Amino acid sequence: MENTIEVNGLRKVFGQNEAIKQVSFNVEKGEIFGLLGPSGSGKTTTIKILTGELGQTTGDVTVLGMDSKQFGTSGFKSKIGILSDNSSLYERLTVYDNLKLFCKLYNAPLTEIDVILKEVNLEEERTKTVSKLSKGMKQRVLLAKALIHKPELVFLDEPTSALDPANMAQIHRGLQRLNEAGTTIFLTTHNMEEATVLCDRVAFLHNGEIQEMDSPDTLRYKYSTHAFHVETFDGDKLVIENNRDNADQIRDLIANGSVKAINTDNPTLGQIFLKITGKELV
């Protein structure tokens, strides 16, 4: 499988602070890859290096077949989209006029504006001045800006942090459609449900180092005790180990019609990260 991003031995030092410590990973073409970690873990620093905003101290970084020396070129910038903490809009202009400027910047057809406004649920706000928008609406305009030119690779740093559940769900559907059309997505998020729904693979970053990396389902299975959690109609909550000796107990509960709910012990990504690092993903 062709890699869109290749990172080998990446290290970033700010003065006496080693923010990134010998990090290595690849992102495959067409993948949604999630970089997860608490604030200060190095997620945003990693994105800034991958997009050319920061240079690495040591290590090799390749994005879309280009090395870090090419990240400042127009050829590189035209192939990526970015939503980060440095993304900004022209507050005095309307939503439509903001996107019109970015269409001209990226040589994208103006017809894309209506398409992307529908994706981010801002069709009715197209003529509103950006300064009058809520924080969540501005976040959606920034996302539209990052996607307007249909980039090969999109970097999204906390893309849904200011959105309500309904708009978040719509953005997720839009990102999934974008990915199905071939766009690779590099995502950072604190929302573990979001990572579970969207990501093909995730990497847990803590203290500048990757602690675990795999698909959400594989990680949840790896850290599961595989026990059965059973709630009965009598209000009992049982934890039954998944082994042959307990098969009769589970069978009897089901045969007697006692089972109100039953599921296996599959931890969330947040619970896994807490187990690995001792820190919450906040």
Image (cartoon, rainbow, N blue to C red):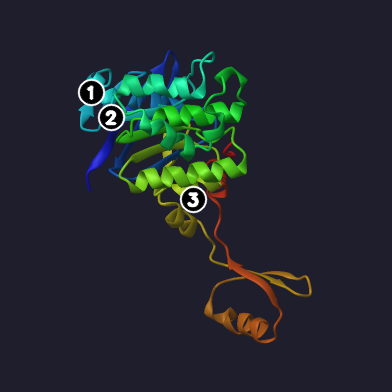
Neighbour tally class for label 1: few under 14, some 14-19, many 20 plus, Cα within 10 Å: few
Question: Residue 199 location in percent, x, y?
Answer: 43, 47
What distance separates the C-alpha of mark 3 from that of mark 1? 32 Å
Q: Amino acid at mark 3?
A: Val
Q: How many marks?
A: 3
Residue nearest the viewer, comparing 244 with 143: 143
The answer to the question of whether label 1 and label 2 lie on touching residues, with beta carbons closer than 8 A, is: yes
SS label for mark 2: loop
Q: Which residue is mark 2?
A: 79
Which amino acid type is shown beneath numbered disc 1? Gly
List x then y, in percent, for residue 200: 39, 49
For the residues labelled 3 and 2, the Cα–Cα distance comes to 25 Å
The residue depicted at 23 percent of the width and 19 percent of the height is: 69
Residue linked to disc 1? 75
* 194 displayed left or right of 75: right
In the foreground, 280 or 73? 73
Task: Indicate which label's residue lies in the foreground, 3 or 1.
Answer: 1
Vertical arrangement, residue 26 with respect to residue 139, above or below: below
Determine which of the numbered discs, if any, sits on residue 197 in the image.
3
